[in-house]
Image (spheres, rainbow, N blue to C red):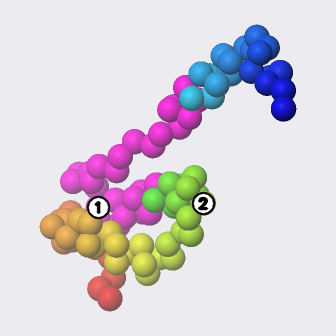
Amino acid sequence: MSNWWLEQDHDDSWIQKQSEEEEQQVMEPFVYDKDDSYQNNFDRWWYMNSLERECWNEPKLDKTAAEKMFRELFPRFRYFGLGSLTDT
């Protein structure tokens, strides 16, 4: 078997460019905004979580599962601020 491909000169700059583009696509971590309502924080987190799951080809959480996970991740903020999610 020939190593023709390995013996040729290649422009591999596209590999670096692709890596830079992928790096730019990394999402910012979610930060709970204490000046906003619990509901708005949840909505923002759920949107970000859905995008992240889509990028990783993972199933998105339905609202009930997302609310449960959010309450587990941010229990101390549950009644902080102006709003709260429905108790379930």
Residue 47 shown in magenta: yes
Q: Please tell me which residue lies in front, 13 or 83.
A: 13
Can you identify the residue that label 1 sits on? 37
Q: Please tell me which residue lies in front, 77 or 68.
A: 68
Q: Please tell me which residue lies in front, 9 or 71.
A: 9
Name the residue at 32% across, 69% down.
70
Of the image marks 2 and 1, the number of the one nearer the N terminus = 1
The reply to whether residue 35 is visible in this rendering is yes
Q: CA distance from mark 2 to mark 1?
A: 30 Å
* Rendering coords of residue 63 (x, y %): 47, 76
Name the residue at 56% across, 34% down.
22
16 relative to 49 in the view: left or right: right
- The amino acid sitting under disc 2 is Asn
Q: Which mark is residue 57?
A: 2
Q: Please tell me which residue lies in front, 47 or 9.
A: 9
Extreme front residue here? 1
Residue 73 shown in magenta: no
The quarter in which the N terminus is drawn is top right
Task: Find the magenta span and give its range.
Answer: 20-48
Callout 1: SS: loop
Q: Which mark is residue 70?
A: none
